[in-house]
Image: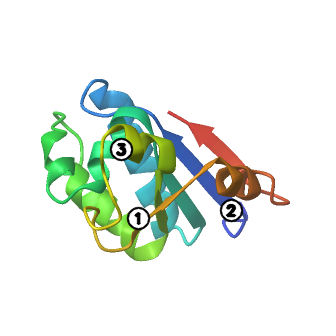
Amino acid sequence: MTDVTRPLVIKTTSGTDRPEAANQALTVAAAAVAAGAEVSLWLTGEAAWFALPGRAADLELEHAAPAPELLDAVVTGGTVTLCTQCAARREITADDVLPGVRIAGAALFAEEVLRPGAQALVY
């Protein structure tokens, strides 16, 4: 049996510009949360928009779970972080994001992926 207690860090740069990659990142993150893993999802690049209320609903993909439900599962059971630089470039502030979403930068990302046993995935 696989040990699901090791940290999983998922970084997605994909938004509605690459719906399959974006949905895959959200699906894997939500599935890992459901399996009991410690999950950290990083929203970067075009995925930064998903940190705003209602914006995950813009991601529609046939035969896929709804993005807002997937994101909510990760916010509830894991950690969701919006990249500091990505937020600044889009003029997104901490007051704008969904409850439970934090804004942080590369130093924290590096800390998370360098933890012993951490698995990092990038979409």
Q: Quadrant of residue 4?
A: bottom right
Q: Residue at x 53, y 43 (%)?
A: 11
**Marks 3, 1: nearer the viewer:** 3
Vertical side of 46 occupied by 50: above or below: below
Q: Residue at x 69, y 70 (%)?
A: 5
Secondary structure type for disc 1 = helix
Residue to which mark 1 is pinned: 74
> Distance between the Cα atoms at labels 3 and 1?
15 Å
* Label 2: element kind: strand
Query: Which mark, by number, is residue 48?
Result: 3
Q: Position of residue 47 (x, y in %)?
A: 36, 40
N-term mark: 3 or 2: 2
Label tally: 3
Q: Is residue 68 left or right of residue 123?
A: left
Question: Which of the two discs, 1 and 2, labels the residue nearer the N terminus?
Answer: 2
Disc 2 target residue: 7
Amino acid found under the numbered disc labelled 3: Ala
* Mark 1 closeness class: few <14, some 14–19, many ≥20 residues within 10 Å: many
Q: Where 106 falls versus 117 (above or below)?
A: above
When the figure is inspected, residue 75 is found, relative to residue 93, above or below; the finding is below
Q: Give the CA distance from mark 3 to mark 2.
A: 22 Å
Q: Could you tell me which residue is drawn at 52 percent across and 67 percent down?
A: 35
Secondary structure type for disc 3: helix
Closer to the eye: label 3 or 2:
3
